Image (cartoon, grey):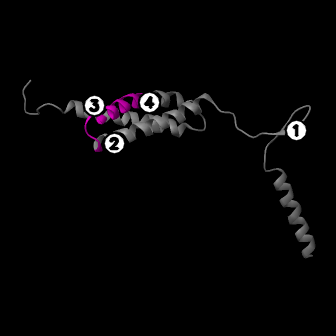
Amino acid sequence: MKRIYSIIILLCISNLIFAAFPVVENCNSISVATELPVEGGDNAAKLSMIYAGVAIFSTILLFVVSGSSGYLLLLIAFVTYPAAFIFGLFGLKSRYKRWQAFIGLFSALLMLLILAISAGSTGDPNAKV
């Protein structure tokens, strides 16, 4: 009886192993599908997340570094935040990597919100206009 159970389990496992990967059938041959198709939105979403990471890293370094190297970091942040936002908009068309597009969009919108708040509060609050 143990031998019959072990043969049944072995047959079930072997059937699962053979069906564990996708097979594409052509008229002439059988080949294994190795990659999923890459959409244009996937690349844009990935670039959006990369630009957002570079922009956030340069912004954090801006608080630590002083002098003329701070201007270079400010320029990098000034260029990469809009790039993260633009690529994030294009990345919203992606099916699988939409979360990467949201990271780029939200980081750029957060920086825009911080800039808007800080630009509005630079004057003297007691001054009469």
Whichever of callouts 3 and 2 sits on the residue coming sooner in the sequence is 2
Q: Are marks 1 and 2 in contact (CB under 8 Å)?
A: no
Instruction: Identify the amino acid type marked 2.
Output: Leu
Task: Say which of 115 and 5 sits in front.
Answer: 115
Per the image, the residue denoted by label 3 is 116
Per the image, the residue denoted by label 1 is 30
Q: Residue at x 27, y 31 (%)?
A: 116
Circle 4 sits in a helix, a strand or a loop, which is it? helix
Front: mark 2 or 4: 2
Q: Alpha carbon of mark 3 to alpha carbon of mark 2: how far?
A: 21 Å
Q: Alpha carbon of mark 1 to alpha carbon of mark 3: how far?
A: 59 Å
Q: Is residue 36 left or right of residue 26?
A: left
Q: Are marks 1 and 4 in contact (CB under 8 Å)?
A: no
Circle 1 sits in a helix, a strand or a loop, which is it? strand
Numbered label attached to residue 85: 4
Numbered label attached to residue 61: 2
Whichever of callouts 2 and 4 sits on the residue coming sooner in the sequence is 2
Q: Residue 4's image quarter?
A: bottom right
Instruction: Identify the amino acid type marked 1.
Output: Ile
